[in-house]
């Protein structure tokens, strides 16, 4: 099992806007460079890209959760 | 006079309002999110209430929780600061309906000025010059083509319901217009649930000039103008007062128009009427009215000696305006710069972190409004403003020298800040000459990226 970590402190979002589907759903596969969410830092938005590939993503951070840099966002097989 | 005030905000403006209230003998109640438990405004207020998790939507924007906190603590009033709920008409209404005084205008005045089309209509009716453009909402591209006869190119297309620079498109030709208009319509509908647009002529080289007003619902006065032409991504970074480009006659005309608008809408509290000033034509045009205290209010306080936040509190307490227009005089020149937790070397990327050694500048003519202290952890959840450095001197030239001196004294360890940007701007010949416009800084930043990276 591997983990995807937040590169920045801020607020985690799973989709680009509230009315859009999440970038990834639980169970999806992930390739290197896939966007898995956004981090809002001081009102600016930054894409979180997967640095490793894997299967069966399971988010441990919820949409709109406050996160610190290095906090786990999701588990991967 | 108000007896107990809840401050529905955080950061430097919460600190500013608490200080004004305490100077007037008004008890203060701070509110804070879980991320702000150690914030300076919480420490300075007489009491503090935790209103929820870090996300603003769940704390600083939660109207029910904030009003419940005010009632529970026995407050008689709420000051909204700027941002968050400051220009939310429903909040003003809800505060009033709860039997509390809202330190600001009525919900109706906020609604009228918050909608670009109704604001423009009200301004034109009060005799305030407006930028050539649509007289109201433009529904459909056919109606838009007719407006082009008024505006020519370039033309700006904005969502009627939008704000803060969102959903703005600029078309330089008919073909660009034909492409941009339907896109703007769809975008406005998606973003605001309202596809209404309006159109406006783009003034090539415009300065941003705004007039501070104070009003009590019946009478209104102005406290002269500020110039805020140095902007990055439509955000002001450096503000000053007075504006050196205005003749005395035009200044009087400009300020009188702001007072006329405030009176026409029965405005109450502190407000700012914003204008574009076209250097070439020597004319000004109304943009919008901000129905709150503004970030840059201290430059006006410096040149007029008026405590604008204290006057807001007096007005909200039911006192009539106590300052007469003839008593408002301008002395010297003031400049404010916004020290943000951003890295100028990396395209102003946000830089939250823990404040290390903090050295605050002092001496004559220097004011430092901030929520920083040694060891303060700057949270990543809110805007990046850390501090405002305000300098005041006899002349603009002396104010720039003083700004450089004060920036030299300032040390904020632990985070990157925009200090380096202001040291460079203060040394720039165009800034020294005041030869700038609202899009000047964007170009300067491209040309000087290396100096900022160094």
Image (spheres, grey):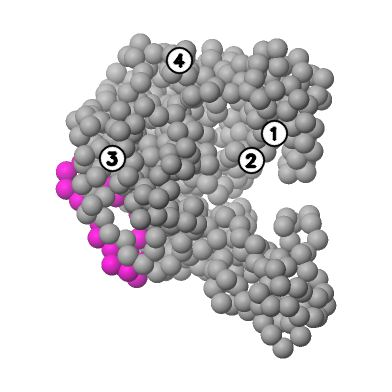
Please give left or right for residue B38 compared with residue B196 in the image: left
Please give left or right for residue B195 compared with residue B424 in the image: right
- The Cα–Cα distance between marks 3 and 2, rounded to whole angstroms, is 32 Å
- The Cα–Cα distance between marks 3 and 4, rounded to whole angstroms, is 26 Å
Numbered disc 4: what chain?
A: B
Residue position marked by numbered label 1 in the rendering: B159
For marks 3 and 1, the one nearer the N-term is 1
Question: Is residue B229 at least partly visible in the picture?
Answer: yes
Numbered disc 2: what chain?
A: B
Residue B214's disc number: none
- Residue drawn at (74%, 38%), measured in percent from left and top? B188
Residue B24, how many percent across, how many down?
Answer: 31, 46
Label 2 CA crowd tier, 10 Å (few <14, some 14–19, many 20+): few
Please give left or right for residue B71 compared with residue B426 in the image: right
Label 3 CA crowd tier, 10 Å (few <14, some 14–19, many 20+): few
- The Cα–Cα distance between marks 3 and 1, rounded to whole angstroms, is 38 Å
Marks 3/1 in contact by CB < 8 Å: the verdict is no
Residue position marked by numbered label 3 in the rendering: B427
- Residue drawn at (68%, 27%), measured in percent from left and top? B171
- The Cα–Cα distance between marks 2 and 4, rounded to whole angstroms, is 28 Å
């Amino acid at each position: 099992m591997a983990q995807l970590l937040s590169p920045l402190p801020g607020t985690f979002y799973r989709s680009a806007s509230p009315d859009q589907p999440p970038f990834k759903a639980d169970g999806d596969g992930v390739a290197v460079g896939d966007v898995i969410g956004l981090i809002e830092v001081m009102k600016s938005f930054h894409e979180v890209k997967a640095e490793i590939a894997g299967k069966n993503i399971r988010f441990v951070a919820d949409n709109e959760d406050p996160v610190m840099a290095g906090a786990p966002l999701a588990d991967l097989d | 006079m108000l007896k107990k005030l809840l401050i529905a905000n955080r950061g430097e403006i919460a600190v500013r309002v608490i200080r004004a209230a305490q100077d007037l003998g008004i008890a203060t109640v701070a509110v804070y999110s879980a991320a702000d438990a150690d914030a300076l405004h919480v420490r300075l207020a007489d009491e503090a209430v935790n209103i929820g998790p870090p996300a603003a939507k769940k704390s600083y924007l939660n109207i029910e929780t904030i009003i419940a906190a005010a009632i529970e603590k026995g407050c008689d009033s709420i000051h909204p600061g700027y941002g968050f709920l400051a220009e939310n008409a429903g909040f003003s209404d809800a505060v009033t309906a709860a039997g509390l005084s809202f330190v600001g205008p009525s919900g109706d005045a906020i609604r009228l000025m918050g909608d670009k089309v109704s604001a423009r209509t009200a301004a034109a009716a009060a005799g305030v010059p407006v930028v050539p453009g649509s007289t109201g909402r433009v529904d459909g591209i056919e109606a838009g083509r007719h407006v082009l006869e008024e505006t020519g190119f370039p033309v700006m297309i904005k969502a009627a319901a939008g704000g803060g620079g969102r959903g703005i498109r600029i078309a330089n030709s008919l073909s660009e217009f034909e492409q941009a208009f339907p896109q703007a319509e769809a975008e406005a509908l998606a973003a605001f649930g309202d596809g209404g647009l309006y159109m406006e002529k783009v003034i090539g080289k415009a300065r941003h000039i705004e007039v501070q007003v104070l009003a009590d619902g019946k009478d209104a006065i102005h406290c002269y103008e500020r110039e805020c032409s140095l902007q990055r991504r439509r955000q002001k970074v450096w503000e000053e007062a007075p504006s050196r480009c205005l003749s005395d006659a035009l200044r009087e005309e400009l300020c009188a128009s702001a007072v006329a608008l405030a009176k026409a809408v029965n405005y109450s509290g502190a407000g700012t009427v914003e204008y574009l000033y076209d250097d070439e034509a020597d004319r000004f045009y109304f943009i919008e009215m901000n129905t709150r205290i503004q970030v840059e209010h201290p430059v006006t306080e410096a040149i007029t000696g008026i405590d604008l936040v204290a006057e807001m509190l007096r007005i909200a307490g039911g006192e009539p305006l106590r300052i007469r227009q003839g008593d408002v005089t301008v002395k010297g020149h003031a400049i404010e710069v916004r020290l943000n937790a951003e890295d100028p070397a990396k395209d102003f990327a946000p830089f939250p972190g823990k404040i290390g050694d903090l050295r605050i500048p002092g001496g004559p003519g220097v004011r430092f409004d901030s929520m920083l202290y040694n060891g303060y952890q700057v949270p990543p959840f809110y805007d990046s403003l850390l501090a405002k450095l305000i300098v005041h001197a006899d002349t603009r030239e002396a104010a720039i020298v003083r700004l450089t001196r004060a920036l030299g004294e300032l040390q904020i360890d632990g985070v990157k800040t925009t200090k380096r940007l202001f040291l460079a701007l203060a040394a720039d010949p165009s800034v020294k000459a005041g030869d700038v416009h609202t899009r000047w800084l964007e170009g300067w930043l491209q040309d000087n990226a290396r100096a900022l990276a160094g």
